[in-house]
Amino acid sequence: MTLNQYKIAIIGAGATGVSVLSELIDKLIEMPNTNQYTISIYEKSGVFGTGLAYGTELDAHILNMPANTMSVKYDRQDQFIYWLKNFSTCCPLAIGKDFIPRRIFGDYLKVIFNTAMLRARQKGITINLISDAVAKIVEKDGFIWAKSSKGFSSYNQLIMCLGNQQPTLGKELKSIPGYFHQPWPESKITTGIPKNRDVNIIGASLSAVDT
């Protein structure tokens, strides 16, 4: 790490990672010497901006919260519904109480992500997109070290944005054909289950409804 260089890592580039990046850029562009900041964003899927939850392509998969509660900006709670009305092609007549397809929220997240990236580069902040998983994190010599397939990298700050983790119940069944430990991405079940098969669903909450 060079003198005066300040390095930040964000682990995960789904909804939480997008929100953190956007808020972080808002703060950093107000600082002097913005070209001294580097942000590295790790995303093991290689898809930056939507995350697993909002990457679905099925309109039947809707948000579980109304549109007027879904902004990723803490000081703009109406941002998502404003974007729907003024910039999206799907929902110009949307109202705050509507439950919008999750893929549309994914489109909104990508806009926020790309806007944050553009603002950062305009101010000289370096952004590294790393399509890799972080396998280990350690603190040493005053830095935080993240290990990926390329080895260890050091950071001044590291922010975990991992989203929802896989369930622990049933993990011992993962190797059994016909067992799906979680229903995401939805292609697992839409293409992986023959149409003439019976299906047992364990659970009765949001993911079960989507399934």
Image (cartoon, helix red, strand yellow):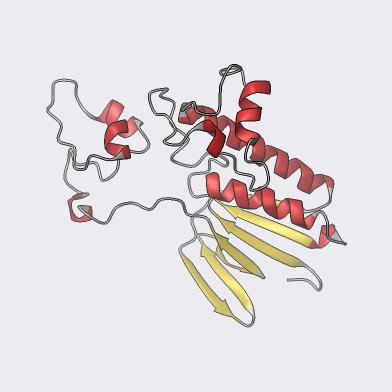
Between 88 and 194, which is closer to the camera in this rendering? 88
Q: Position of residue 10 (x, y in %)?
A: 59, 57
Q: Position of residue 137 (x, y in %)?
A: 51, 70
Left or right of residue 33: residue 85: left
Q: Quadrant of residue 37?
A: bottom right
Residue 211 appears in the picture as rendered: no
Residue 185 appears in the picture as rendered: yes
Q: Residue at x 70, y 65 (%)?
A: 7
Q: How many marks?
A: 0
Left or right of residue 60: residue 107: right
Quadrant of the frame with the N terminus: bottom right
The extreme bottom residue here reads 141
Q: Residue at x 38, y 36 (%)?
A: 185
Q: Position of residue 211 (x, y in %)?
A: 28, 32
Left or right of residue 138: residue 177: left
Q: Residue at x 61, y 53 (%)?
A: 41
Between 112 and 44, which is closer to the camera in this rendering? 112
Q: Residue at x 47, y 54 (%)?
A: 162
Between 205 and 40, which is closer to the camera in this rendering? 205
Vertical placement of residue 116 versus 63, above or below: below
Vertical placement of residue 64 versus 145, above or below: above
Left or right of residue 173: residue 116: right
Q: Position of residue 197 (x, y in %)?
A: 13, 26
